[in-house]
Image (spheres, rainbow, N blue to C red):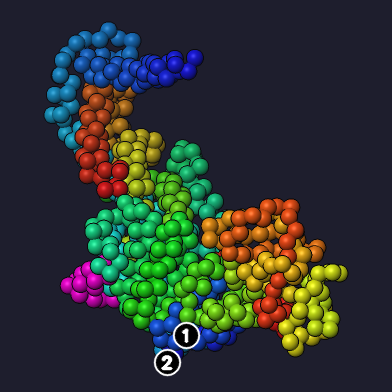
Amino acid sequence: MTTVSLRSLRKTYGTVVAVEGVDLEIAEGELIVLLGPSGCGKSTTLRMVAGLETTTSGQLMIGERDVTTLEPKDRDIAMVFQNYALYPHKTIRANMSFGLKMRGMSAADTAREVDRAAEMLDIAHLLDRKPAQLSGGQMQRVALGRALVRDPAIFLLDEPLSNLDAKLRARMREEIALLQRRIGKAMLYVTHDQTEAMTLADRIVIMRDGHVQQIGSPLEVYDRPANAFVAGFVGSPEMNLVPARIESGRIILDDGVATPAPGNAPTGPVLVGIRPEALVPSHQGMPFVVQGVEQLGSQTLFIGLLGPHRVRVLASRINDVAPGEAIHVAVEPEAVHLFDNASGARL
Amino acid sequence: MTRWMLPGFLTIGALATLVLIVGPAIYAISLSFFDRTSLTAEPVWVGFDNFANVLSSGAFWNALWNGFVYAGVAIVLQVVLGIGFALLLHQPFRGRALLRGVAFLPYLLPTVVAVLTFKWMIDGSLGIVTIKMADWGLPPIYWFETESAAMFSVIMVSVWLWTPFVTTTFLAGLQTIPVQLYEAARVDGAGPIRRFFHITLPSLRPILTVIILLRGVWMFNKFDVIWLTTGGGPLGATEHLPVLAYREAFRLFDIGTGAAIATLSFLVLMVIVTIYFWAFPMDDRK
Ligand SMILES: Nc1ncnc2c1ncn2[C@@H]1O[C@H](COP(=O)(O)OP(=O)(O)OP(=O)(O)O)[C@@H](O)[C@H]1O
Ligand SMILES: [Mg+2]
């Protein structure tokens, strides 16, 4: 069942097009991640759903209602801001109660709801403090709590973890995922971090310059990127993208550097995408000159030259290859992505 | 070298304070214990006589009361209007920068010029206000000459002169409030009025505390507006402590009484400021 639908949502600021026609159906309990580089229109899209930004054209439905022109408070949404936006003069309890109070909930019910959310987020002991007396991670929890008490149709989160250190970010990410499963409400989550997107999302919406590039589950997006941009943006380390041509069933990167092409590959110039982990060091294959070695513990990342192109190779741990050495790498034809040379679209 | 810098600067600071602030203050206070008809006359020690005389005179209590009314009403109006104008000028609209500049103009005028302009506008026979009022068939009002209107008039002139300062200060304060707080409040369902009372006002509180204190003290000691418009009259209706002290010391040549009034005024202010600090601590992080 659909809770929220974005229909050709569009936003322009004067001549600047921030968001160009986003279409998206969000199902009940679904966690959607809006992913893309800085300035691609993620926040603008989210803020249009929130009602903090007017829509230039298009329609927004929440439940059965057209809410395109309604105030945020009338939309049945709750939002978590990037910088938390906790009311600095109110206690944590007052921060979390505010939205309920504004909606006329009785003091007793409000207190109960706040206690329940605080329990869930493990912040019950902080309720009497002011925001300035909390750590970043605690503020983050309070911001989540403030959204949680409201029990809305959809939660909107704009880069909620970007102010936390790497460790805490990973932990909060897990917690948000668990929490969202537990309460079973839809969530629209904005981030520019592809790891967050991959680990959290039921479906990822990838945007670029205001345009949606692809919508799909994390594995769909990873396995079958719709174009070269998505291919390069999703996955870490980044996919290697090199120009090549296809001749008689072979991908030719450069004279002398070639590898078998996947079946039904068209002849002619293409853009070839190979994930670093799909390139496997072996005795035969393409010659690869190692320039740099990064030991990651269980894996080893090589940076080097494949013909004239710099690429990355991610292998399981190898100890005895040093920069300057020449080895060979091989790739399965099925693991090669082919994109149109000009448009970047998947072939 | 650096070892001597801190003690050195401290000594210089302490000496400067002694010579420039504590010294004159003690001298001024000491004047109130003497009887003296001019600054060159030989002083005669009279102990607390000057204070006794002042405290038993109706003029002192009248002036004290007038001072409270003048400072109190003027500060309330300045703050209320100042916040109002600041909120208006904070809204985005075409020509905002220009209007912000214009709104600050009164503060740049020398008080004398402003007061003369006012007097000229409301002149009993030639003033534009007087003529307009006559045109509309309204009876003339003697703004500075009748007891009932004079206090109102001096307060209005003061409010006109110094509201811009308050407006500008609040405007600066408004710009420091994160927009996200207002957005969060909108999502939480708070309308404009609740946003004002739950976000704007608490955020401005530190500025408000300082402004009320500074403007209050300033208005209580403000001499020129009243002196230039009514001179404390008519019949003492606008006479407050600074005017009374000045009149005693330099018009009636009773320097001892003038100094005693000034000393008492200082004590009154000190008590009020102490209570204020206690009631509204500057550090509100608790
Ligand atoms: N108020 C505005 N006026 C004009 N242009 C704007 C305004 N707000 C956003 N834009 C433009 O719209 C585009 C999308 O902005 P948006 O904030 O949605 O990006 P984003 O994807 O959230 O980026 P980030 O990851 O940096 O937060 C940008 O090009 C931005 O410059
Ligand atoms: Mg953003």
Chain hosting mark 1: A
Q: Is residue B262 magenta?
A: no
Q: Give B272 or A222, whichever is nearer the viewer.
A: A222
In this image, B7 relative to B76: left or right? right
Identify the residue at horizontal 30%, vertical 66% (top origin).
A121
Q: The residue tagged with tag 1: helix, strand or loop?
A: strand
What is the magenta segment's predominant secondary structure?
helix
Residue B176, given in percent of the width and then of the height, sits at: 45, 53
Up the image or down, A314 lies above or below B154; here it is below
The residue at the point 37 percent across, 68 percent down is A175
**Residue at 28% in and 18% down:** B26
Q: How busy is the neighbourhood of tag 2: few (under 14 within 10 Å), some, or many (20 plus)?
A: few
Instruction: Decide if residue A213 is on the left or right side of residue B273.
Output: right
Is A104 included in the stretch rendered in magenta? yes
Q: Which residues are magenta?
A: A103-118
Q: Which residue is mark 2?
A: A1
Residue at image position (33%, 78%) is A182
B31 relative position to A335: left or right: left
Do labels 1 and 2 touch, CB within 8 Å? no
